[in-house]
Image (spheres, rainbow, N blue to C red):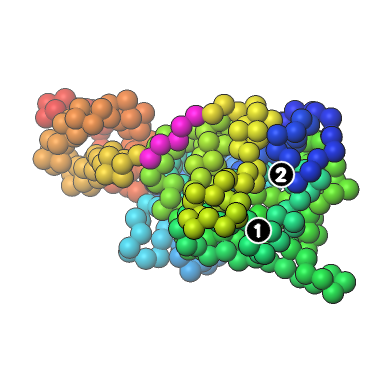
């Protein structure tokens, strides 16, 4: 997913030059693991090829690489080994190159087609990394980090881990990046020299091509400002649907929400309270939005109990239907379904999912030899 940027003319800049014309930024998803539910259909078709692992991994009994229309698409893990996890939980990690070679719309269409062919249901995100790239010509990050290290700039907010990465060059300390927060936290920030990182870990030509298309002066190092968000953080984000996941406005606003109050920099003028110091604008997110053509929008926090209630009721309906079929059409399992669908406004969801559930239950041989007309009669009679 690459979001095009304005083709302004480079101007001489000083550090913290967000407000100058000609600013260039690239904004991308860089890492994505999605959670699904169901029993995936993993038979090779004309469009999908599954390269199955013989032993899976420590967490999942089954693992496979997915190729879609001849292109590497992702890695899928399913059939959890532990009883703690939902037995129908599926995790799909998309290939990194897709975020830089496809538009958001193209990637969304690919994903929807793949999950439709596999017959699985989206239930949430496991991890999402969002990244802003920029040239060192625009932001002098080594100087910025040195000023923090020397106490000329202060980090406001709660106490947090702040790990600066350095190495020596010609006897002097060279700053290569910083990690804000712990890896185990719900969210974690990173700022690092992406050019150096790619040389060390293997050049990714699709990222280099994206930089060139963006108009970066690659004679300067390119730096990355990134936020990693886990399910613990994402599950409370209002509006985080599969559709919004592929909208740049939603994503840049989500990035802004993640970094707000987490990495807030202040000038150090000697005041007793850090929060009363004047803000130091590291990167102006409003400027980034203008450059990438995004619109400001509020990203709220959805009450966990509300969101989990809807997901829980959907799972309850599926569970009741499964019990109905596997018990030989015991109509007592059908009785609560209509009330749930009505109370939680899930009729549209039910009409969209019921045929998929029939196929899944048939795959498990729960409705072997059953006449679906019987189900329809029981459903109407009891509901």
Secondary element at image label 1: loop
- Residue hosting label 1: 152
Q: Is 220 left or right of 21, judged from the image as shown?
A: right
Closer-to-camera residue (383/181): 181
Name which residue lies at 61% across and 37% down.
Answer: 285
Closer-to-camera residue (146/60): 146
Q: Is 362 left or right of 208, judged from the image as shown?
A: left
Q: In the rendered view of the protein, which quadrant contains the N terminus? A: top right
Name which residue lies at 49% across and 51% down.
Answer: 275
Q: What percent of the width, then of the height, locates residue 51?
A: 60, 54
Instruction: Locate residue 283: give its quadrant.
Output: top right
Q: Is 85 left or right of 40, judged from the image as shown?
A: left
Checking the image for residue 16, the label placed there is 2
Relative vertical location of residue 183 with respect to residue 219 in this rendering, above or below: below
Mark 1 → mark 2, Cα distance in angstroms: 15 Å
Relative vertical location of residue 81 with respect to residue 103 in this rendering, above or below: below
Q: Can residue 224 be seen in this view?
A: yes
Secondary element at image label 2: loop
What segment is highlighted magenta in the picture?
297-301
């Amino acid at each position: 997913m690459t979001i095009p940027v304005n083709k302004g003319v480079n101007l001489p800049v000083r550090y913290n030059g967000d407000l100058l014309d000609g600013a260039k930024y690239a904004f991308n998803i860089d890492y994505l693991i999605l959670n699904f539910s169901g029993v995936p259909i993993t038979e090779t078709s004309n469009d999908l090829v599954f390269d199955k692992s013989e032993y899976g991994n420590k967490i999942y009994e089954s693992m496979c690489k997915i190729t879609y229309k001849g292109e590497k698409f992702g890695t899928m893990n399913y059939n959890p080994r532990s009883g703690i996890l939902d037995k129908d939980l599926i995790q799909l990690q998309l290939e990194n190159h897709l975020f830089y070679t496809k538009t958001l719309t193209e990637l969304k269409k690919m994903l929807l087609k793949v999950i439709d062919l596999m017959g699985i249901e989206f239930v949430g995100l496991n991890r999402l990394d969002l990244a802003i790239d920029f040239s060192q010509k625009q932001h002098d990050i080594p100087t910025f980090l040195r000023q923090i290290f020397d106490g000329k700039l202060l980090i406001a907010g709660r106490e947090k881990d702040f790990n600066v990465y350095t190495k020596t060059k010609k006897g002097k300390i060279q700053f290569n990046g910083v990690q804000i927060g712990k890896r185990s936290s719900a969210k974690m920030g990173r700022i690092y020299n992406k050019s150096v990182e790619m040389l060390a870990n293997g050049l990714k030509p699709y990222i280099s091509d994206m930089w060139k298309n963006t108009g970066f002066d690659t004679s300067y190092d390119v730096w990355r400002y990134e936020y990693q968000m886990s399910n613990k953080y994402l599950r409370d984000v209002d509006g985080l649907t599969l559709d919004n996941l592929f909208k740049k406005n939603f994503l840049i606003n989500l990035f802004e929400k993640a970094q707000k109050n987490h990495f807030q920099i202040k000038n150090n003028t000697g005041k007793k309270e850090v929060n009363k110091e004047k803000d130091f604008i590291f990167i102006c997110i409003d400027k980034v939005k203008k450059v990438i053509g995004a619109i400001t929008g509020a990203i709220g926090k959805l009450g966990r109990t509300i969101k989990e209630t809807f997901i829980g009721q959907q799972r309850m309906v599926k569970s009741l239907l499964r019990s109905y079929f596997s018990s030989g059409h015991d109509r007592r399992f059908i009785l609560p379904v209509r009330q749930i669908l009505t109370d939680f406004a899930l009729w549209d969801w039910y009409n969209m999912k019921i045929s998929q559930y029939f196929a899944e239950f048939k795959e498990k041989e729960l409705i072997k030899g059953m006449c679906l007309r019987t189900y329809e009669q029981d459903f109407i009679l009891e509901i």
